[in-house]
Amino acid sequence: MIPYSTQHIDQEDIQAVTEALQKEYLTSGTTVNEFEEKVAQYVGAKYAVAVSSGTAALHAACAAAGIQEDDEVITTPITWVSSANAAFYCGGRPVFADIDKDTYNISPDEIEKKITKHTKAIIPVHYAGQPCDMANTHEIAQAHGLTVIEDAAHAIGAIYKGCKIGALSDMTIFSFHPVKQITTCEGGMVCTNNKELYEKLKLFRAYGMVKSQTTMEQEGPWFSDEMSLGYNYRLSDVQCALGISQMRKIDKLIERRREIARIYDFEFQNVEGIVVPKQSPDGISAYHLYPIQVDADKRKDLYMQFREAGIGVGVHYYPVYKNTYYQVSGYKDICCKISEQFYERELSLPVHYKVTDDEVDYIVETTKKLLA
């Protein structure tokens, strides 16, 4: 089965992990700092905080932004549930704005419609790796005094108006799950240019514990003080060693995804019954996904036929508010029409470094055959 996405681990990565396992510190060591510095430098941010997952990164970012009871956070329904759940984790509520029909990203016009006196933040999600319309999103956020937390779980390496995603907003989160462009097995990162947010994020990921010279002199050199409620969201040195090794080849990994996407774009441009993803002139996608649209009444059968042919297509995503937890939590009357229509038609074709040229040809031929 050719998966829609998967990790690429080579001998260099294995050696990096082996060496990390032989070091004195397996967690909370200097390798974590080195990985943070590598990612911050790559995306152009001043600060980066490594955490245990992309979900933990979203939770930490919402906590650092001060999301609390009665606060609302606007996001897209076409995303993994974590983008919205993070608001719930902090006592707030997610509010869903519909997507743009061409880019599949959250629509700034729809964001504007959802703002109330309770709105505290916006979480735009760079779906499939294509950057959102950040210029208009920032304009709206500034006009209403809102925090912007970019969910770039799909988008490390993506470019918006000449700048890499990661340093454009108050905070940006990344995911290093195995299906993403690079991996630390599980893991995430929050990037920011704001020193105050950086300090809050570091505190949040490690129990809220602080060592200070004053308290250590009073109690003893062993003493740590819990200054605020935090979590154990730390990422181990072993995982960070893998991340550092992966960062050395990130551009190669992403360029292969773009190469495959260009082939799909060309091969499917005049094929009846398929809509290929349109790219905004302001952005360059990192292609975590290659989402096509097919006829809604054929989508389920096509999904099964692709998989029977050994092509592991995916579906991304069931609109978040339609999940059972949301339905019983006050979201029964929510309808984002474009998002629901998109979900009914979407299939994700394989697009990752390990897809060979022969496999790309097979995917193209099979797609054309099934649609015919």
Image (spheres, rainbow, N blue to C red):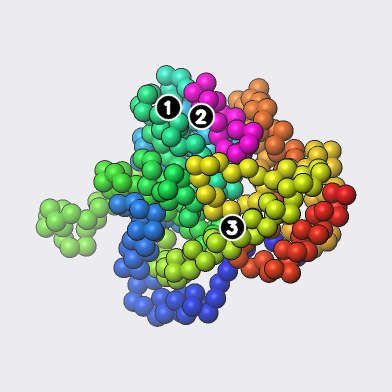
Q: Residue at x 56, y 57 (%)?
A: 180
Residue 239: x %, y % from top left: 45, 67
Task: Report the residue marked by disc 3.
Answer: 258
Task: Report the residue marked by disc 2.
Answer: 108
Is residue 286 something that shows in the picture?
A: yes
Q: Is residue 337 above or below residue 17?
A: above
Which residue is at the front of the view, 25 or 369?
369
Left or right: where does residue 216 sit relative to residue 320?
Answer: left
The residue segment tinted magenta is: 90-113
Given contact means CB atoms under 8 Å apart, are the residues at marks 2 and 1 in contact? yes
Label 3 to label 1: alpha-carbon separation: 31 Å
Task: Report the residue marked by disc 1.
Answer: 140
Label 2 to label 3: alpha-carbon separation: 26 Å
Residue type pointed to by label 1: Ile
Q: Residue at x 64, y 55 (%)?
A: 261
Magenta-span inclusion, residue 342:
no
Disc nearer the start of the sequence (3/1): 1
Is label 2 in a helix, a strand or a loop? Answer: helix
Residue 336: x %, y % from top left: 64, 28
Given contact means CB atoms under 8 Å apart, are the residues at marks 2 and 3 in contact? no
Disc nearer the start of the sequence (2/3): 2
